[in-house]
Image (cartoon, grey):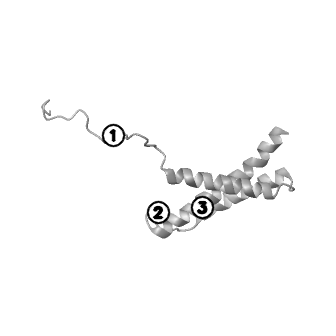
Amino acid sequence: MIPQEDRDDNAGAKRKPTHLGATRVPLHLVFQACVGVIIGIGITSLFSGVDHAQLALAGVIVVIAAWIVEQGFRLPEPNTTSGARIRLVLRIVSLVGFTIAVSPLLQLIEA
């Protein structure tokens, strides 16, 4: 048995102290999300003459294609420059596809 004075009751990972203005989500992820949504809304507005269901299906296909590339191919490690850039592009493409898929559905709900 460990004596009381040698035992550390707070054993485990220590939390970093939070600083004023600190967020839990890194700002580059917020920036990626904003860029993906803005591009998706722009593409959706360009194809406003297309049927809503077809546009939503196209967005789903884009998301599935990005997922297949991420899961089906051997990508460089995420801690390398090329691996980080490839994953950045795949995340943005997925967000664009998601926005394309959801935007026409929101327009159908409003109508």
Instruction: Determine which residue is flagged by label 3.
Output: 90
State which quadrant residue 72 falls in: bottom right
Kindly identify the amino acid type of the residue bearing the numbered disc 3: Leu
Kindly identify the amino acid type of the residue bearing the numbered disc 2: Pro
Q: Is residue 95 visible?
A: no
Instruction: Determine which residue is flagged by label 1.
Output: 17
Closer to the camera, 70 or 99? 99
Q: Nearer the viewer, mark 3 or mark 1?
A: 1
Category of crowding for the residue at label 1, using alpha-carbon neighbours closer than 10 angstroms: few (below 14), some (14–19), many (at least 20): few
Question: How far is disc 2 from disc 3 in space, using C-alphas?
Answer: 12 Å
Kindly identify the amino acid type of the residue bearing the numbered disc 1: Pro
Instruction: Determine which residue is flagged by label 2.
Output: 78
Q: Are marks 3 and 1 in contact (CB under 8 Å)?
A: no
Q: Position of residue 71 (x, y in %)?
A: 57, 61
Q: Are marks 2 and 3 in contact (CB under 8 Å)?
A: no
Q: Position of residue 29 (x, y in %)?
A: 53, 52
Considering the image in quadrants, where does the N terminus appear?
top left
Q: Is residue 9 visible?
A: yes
Secondary structure at numbered mark 2? loop
State which quadrant residue 97 falls in: bottom right
Q: Are marks 1 and 2 in contact (CB under 8 Å)?
A: no
Residue 104 higher or lower than 109, as above or below: below
Question: How far is disc 3 from disc 1 in space, using C-alphas?
Answer: 33 Å
Closer to the camera, 69 or 15? 15
Instruction: Tell me which numbered mark, 1 or 2, is placed earlier along the sequence.
Output: 1
